[in-house]
Image: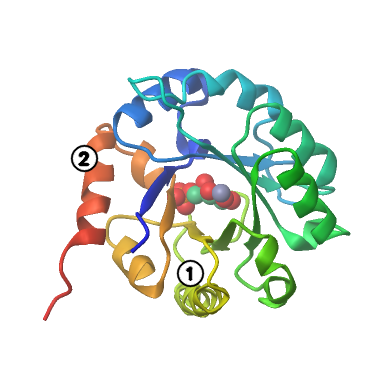
Amino acid sequence: MTQALIAPSLLSADFARLGEEVRSVVAAGADWIHLDVMDNHFVPNLTFGPMVCQALRKYAVHADGSRVPIDVHLMVQPVDALARAFADAGADVITFHPEAGAHVDRTLQLIKAAGCKAGLVLNPSSPLDALEWELDQLDVVLIMSVNPGFGGQSFIPAALKKIERVRKMIEASGRDIRLEVDGGIKTGNIRAAHDAGADTFVAGSAIFGQSDYRSVIDAMRAEISRPAAT
Ligand code: DX5
Ligand code: ZN
């Protein structure tokens, strides 16, 4: 079984202390740092540019000096110029929404050529069509379980069915593709997302809304690994 990864979303961190927040959440056990990039055009909110990603890179390291991957979720339109800029700014994973790009396959190629892992993000109402033709180009599929744009929204249960379907597609492909879920993930529902087939879990408000980040991350991992109820 693939190792489950917890990816805290900085969208709910204290923006006045972002570097410290990254350091704290890494010390608390974060596997990836999820950076939500919003352009006030594709989504109705405005967040971080590539310079912020670059500035945060030096904080996304473990005590032994090894790096914690920065997972850039692009909610921008058009995609290509910013994908390139985030790759140059030290992103490790770059995902984008297929409806935001005119030439999805070309954008995936661009991200991979820049040395990053590439992924597609599916909104709650988005069909799986893009995956059918692009699965062999993907390192990550990100299923949105809220409508993108804001943190602190409630998990949309239909996402579980979508995760199940995408898990089957990934298994059938035989490829090593992460299945990430983003939006409304809490200690109380992470197990359902895991059981549906997700292996990478974005959580913003659930983690940064508490003072003890480690206890939330530990509780999430405990949920994922507890034996199934009989
Ligand atoms: C929403 C973002 C999510 C969001 C998750 O557009 O993509 O990453 O920050 O936040 P929570 O966990 O609070 O739903
Ligand atoms: Zn996100």
Q: Picture quarter containing residue 8? A: top left
SS at badge 1: loop
Rendered location of residue 108, percent (x, y): 75, 53
Q: Residues within 10 Å of mark 1 (few under 14, many from 20)?
A: some
Rendered location of residue 58, percent (x, y): 51, 18
Note whether residue 152 is visible.
no
Rendered location of residue 21, percent (x, y): 42, 25
Q: How much space separates mark 1 and mark 2, taking CA atoms?
A: 25 Å
Residue receiving disc 2: 215
Q: Is residue 137 above or below residue 7?
A: below
SS at badge 2: helix
Q: Is residue 91 above or below residue 125?
A: above
User: With 216 as the anchor, is 133 left or right in this view?
Assistant: right
Label annotation for residue 68: none
For the point 66% across and 76% down, the residue is: 128
Q: Picture quarter containing residue 154? A: bottom left
Amino acid at circle 1: Ile
Which comes before the other along the chain, label 1 or label 2? 1
For the point 70% across and 30% down, the residue is: 49
Q: Is residue 161 above or below residue 123?
A: below
| Between 25 and 109, the one nearer to me in the picture | 109
Residue receiving disc 1: 156
Mark 2 and ligand 1: say if the CB distance to the nearest ligand atom is below 8 Å.
no
Q: Quadrant of the C terminus?
A: bottom left
Amino acid at circle 2: Ser
Q: Quadrant of the N terminus?
A: bottom left
Residue at the far right: name it.
102
Residue at the far front: name it.
174
